[in-house]
Amino acid sequence: MIFGNEWDILLEDEMKKPYYQALRQFLVQEYRTTAVYPPQNEIFHALRRTTYSSVRCAILGQDPYHGEGQAHGMSFSVRRGVVPPPSLRNIYKEILSDTGIDNTHACGELTEWADQGVLLLNTVLTVRAGAAGSHRGKGWEQFTDEIIRLLDLREDPIVFLLWGAPAGAKAALIRNPCHLVLRAAHPSPLSASKGFFGCRHFSQTNAFLTAHGFPAIDWQIRS
């Protein structure tokens, strides 16, 4: 078992496909010869932490942080004790503006969100150290497309937060009218002012969930 939950059955056939086997071979070589993030045993941390049936909100980013010790397999999250990177600090700024919740001095590990059903997924799940986008076009996009397609089949409503162009491209895969799709610019310093700040995705997510009889997400990071 790779994930230890429903994802094992749901993704079993996908992981047998030729493109995924080629991706695996590429990753074996990459991890053997250069620094790659996150560590191999944490590539699927988001899927292990948030089961298929528990997903209420999916936050899609681009690829993992490429700095040493940052990425641990959940989009925008960093290991406890690591200073939150600029993208995450901008996320916290938008949460404060949108909801009044102040995470300014919180840690950057977002497991509290994941445990409430927030799937923290990147469109590409690995990256070379110091080289953003270095693992794009190797097969991860096809794999994460399948994850989105599977979530789209869910009968319970899910909020999809698609941040940045690669994530926004996944919108075409979400066809079930019971779900809510919200798109915005990526929260990185280069693009946050071009449509991320002021998007109000966090309050909109909770308004949608509660309107459909589901608990709101508590965006406060307490640990």
Image (cartoon, helix red, strand yellow):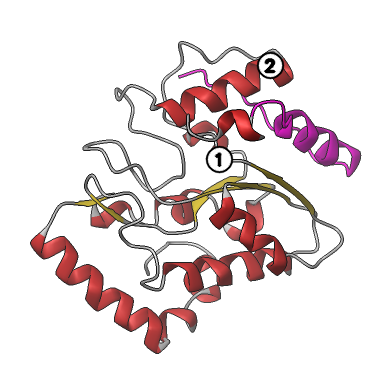
- Percent position (x, y) of residue 119? 57, 48
Q: Residue furthest right?
A: 211
**Residue 202 belongs to the span the image colors magenta:** yes
Q: Is residue 196 left or right of residue 175?
A: left
Horizontal side of 9 relative to 153 (left or right) equals: left
- In the rendered image, the quadrant that contains the N terminus is bottom left
Residue drawn at (32%, 75%) of the image: 23
Q: Earlier in the sequence, mark 2 or mark 1?
A: 2
According to the picture, the residue beneath numbered tag 2 turns out to be 97
Left or right, 31 with reference to 47: left
Amino acid type shown at disc 1: His
The amino acid on which the numbered mark 2 sits, given as a three-letter code, is: Ser
Looking at the rendered image, the quarter that the C terminus falls into is top left
Q: Position of residue 213 (x, y in %)?
A: 87, 41
Proximity of marks 2 and 1: CB atoms separated by less than 8 Å: no
Closest to the observer, 118 or 196: 196
Mark 2 element type? helix
Q: Secondary structure at mark 1?
A: loop
Camera-side residue: 140 or 10?
140
Magenta stretch encompasses residue 181? no
Q: As drawn, is 69 to the left or to the right of 222?
A: left
Relative to 133, say whether 30 is above or below. Answer: below
> Which residue is at a point 60% across and 60% down the rendered structure image?
52
Which of discs 2 and 1 lies nearer the camera? The answer is 1
Q: Residue at x 37, y 47 (%)?
A: 64
Residue 100, quarter of the rendered image: top right
Task: Magenta stretch: give its range.
Answer: 197-223
- Looking at this view, name the residue that lies furthest to the bottom: 18
Which residue is depicted at the point 77% across and 28% down?
A: 203
The residue beneath circle 1 is: 186
In the rendered image of this protein, does residue 140 appear above or below residue 57?
below
Which mark, by number, is residue 52?
Answer: none
